[in-house]
Image: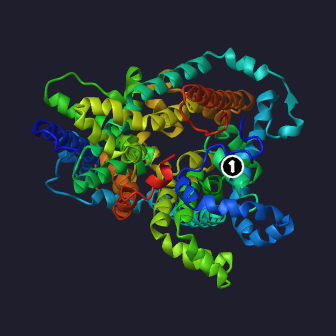
Amino acid sequence: MEPPTRLGLAAKVMTLVIISFVVLYPFAAVVMTSLSTQDEITRNGGLVLFPVEPTLEAYRVIFSGGTVTRALLVSVAVTVAGTLASLSVTVAMAFALARRELTGGRAILMVALFTMLFSPGIIPNYLLVKELGLLNSFGSLILPALVSAFNLVVLRSFFMGLPQELLESARMDGAGDLRILLRIVLPLSKAVVAVVSLFYAVAYWNAFFNALLYLESDKWPLPLILRLYVLQGQPLGADIAAAAGEVPPPAQALQMAVVVVALVPILLVYPFLQRYFTKGVLTGAVKG
Amino acid sequence: MVKQSGPPRAALRPPGASPPEAAAGAPERAAGRPARRRVPLRRRLRRDGVLLLLALPGLLYFLVFHYLPLFGYVIAFQDFQPFLGFAESAWVGLDNFAALFGDPRFWSALGNTLRITLVQLVLFFPAPIGLALLLHSILSDKIRRFVQSIVYLPHFIGWVIIVSIFQQVLGGAGVVPHLMDALGLPRYDVMTDPDAFPWLVALQVIWKDAGWGTIIFLAALLSIDQGLYEAAAIDGAGRWRRLWHITLPGITPVIILLLILNLGSILSVGFEQIVLQRDAVGPEAGEVLDTYVYFHGIRSGEWGTSAAVGLIKAVVGTALVLGANKVAHLFGQEGVYRGADK
């Protein structure tokens, strides 16, 4: 293709700059507000570009209160346990289904793929979780979301694209299927396993729906605490500061500090994994 | 019609499976199929035993958590009482549906759902296509990757965080109202305006997923034969003509595929996103079918009628996907399934 005209280029660059700003600015606004004092927030009305006297007071208060700390622990535990469980089950199933001549493999694959087209709905799911005795247990956050058909397909098509001669020769040498999976397939699939882990981890970290349906408030993970304090405006930590005879940090700063706590893990992991998306790990799988 | 003797062709061919299959499948299949018939089932089961065991937990998951609950829809025809269970609850025929159709709040929820889906279709659906075209037209790999990594990010942020962020930027005490004050404009809080709700919802979905949605279109754009562009340029076709006659036809199958899948979810709008904001705008504007089911079923114990809503949603969604797929085939497009009708 010939190089674009100057005007066209300028328009494109402008558009991209604006889009990037619209995506990134809200994050900055949240972080800056969480570091601000009441003075600054009153003066600027949430539009704190950069706090003159940044303070971590809001973070100190939310972590001394107990609720946020406990919710954070719940979220971390569910995310770690859930991701490990989901990953093991999905990798095992994808590896099995990647073998073309597997007896019944076609049928099993269809059972899984068809679930992409429908979902059972809120009421039947609730009744099932209740019948299984999972109500108000952390299992209700993990088991109903154990395998995603999409992730299964991503892994399976990656496994199918591995050089089959390699697996064949290992089989000739007498390696069993399990050994092939652990010693040959997994070491070759680090990138795609990392991407799928991210998908699962993010889903567990953001788990809202299942927690709302199945858990009592004393077991709530971070997203529900966030809703309670930020969206439903429940006062947070003010009593603690007042009891200690201090002026509480501004409500907005406290709220945004909780948002930041929920955001940070995602923002930390994302840069290491995003290069795999742009490298096209997914394009092969997404392409119909 | 032609292929009656062969094994039933797979609906929903696993995406991405085609290249290796096409490359390795042909010779292997010619030699492999007669041999495979001769291997007795018991021997094949012993050969595949480990693999089948590996697939078992996943298979059980799908059966238990995706297929088993479907039987729960029987309560749409019952006066379901949790302490009585499925077996003991009284059968009431279509009473639940009758009660539902007589409830103005159901019709209002249906109307809101359709309004929100429609606005989303018009505003959100084209956004990733435009963004993908823009990204694709950038010749520098580095810049494109950089912008991609920025616009994919919001996809990974949960709805609670996104709604909180929007509240902070657009809400009453937020950035935008403050700016408007400073400019002397009248105060306006979009987060609590019932009339603006569908637009707000679409705006949030665009912020979250327009970037992520480009992946599938970028893949389709990459697969267009570059020779076509060169040939067209030599024939004197300008930029727009090439866009219209080469690029658009190249991504049409993906657009149609996504439109069909969208049709299937026409009665579903993101539960999480809506339930978080329903109270801010009030149920008249913020109630959708899924939140209706949640509040009436799980919160108030009207199990039968809410299960009826779920059943209607499932049936309408499936019928729309299958119907739209049929129409796509009539127009010579591939749609979601391949070969199923041919």
Visible in this render: residue B7? yes
Q: Give the camera-side residue of B192 and A1.
A: A1
x then y, percent, for residue B153: 35, 51
Residue that lies at the very extreme toward the left in this rendered image: A6
Which quadrant holds residue B247?
A: top left
Q: Which residue is mark 1?
A: A110
x then y, percent, for residue B17: 56, 55
x then y, percent, for residue A224: 50, 48
Visible in this render: residue A83? no
Does B305 appear above or below B61? above
Report the chain holding disc 1: A
Q: Is residue A135 left or right of residue B14?
A: right
Task: Name the residue at 77% across, 72% down.
Answer: B47
Q: Is residue A126 left or right of residue A211?
A: right
x then y, percent, for residue A91: 59, 65
Q: Is residue B149 left or right of residue B307?
A: left
Does B232 appear above or below B117? below
> Dot 1: within a 10 Å radius of its alpha carbon, few (fewer than 14), some, or many (20 or more) residues?
some
Q: Secondary structure at mark 1?
A: helix
User: What type is the residue that disc 1 sits on?
Assistant: Met
Task: Name the residue at 83% across, 70% down.
Answer: B43
Residue that lies at the very extreme toward the right in this rendered image: B88
Does B134 appear above or below B292? below
Does A262 appear above or below B5? below
Task: Name the residue at 17% across, 47% down.
Answer: A49
Q: Give the camera-side residue of A40 and A200.
A: A200
Q: Is residue A232 left or right of residue A47?
A: right
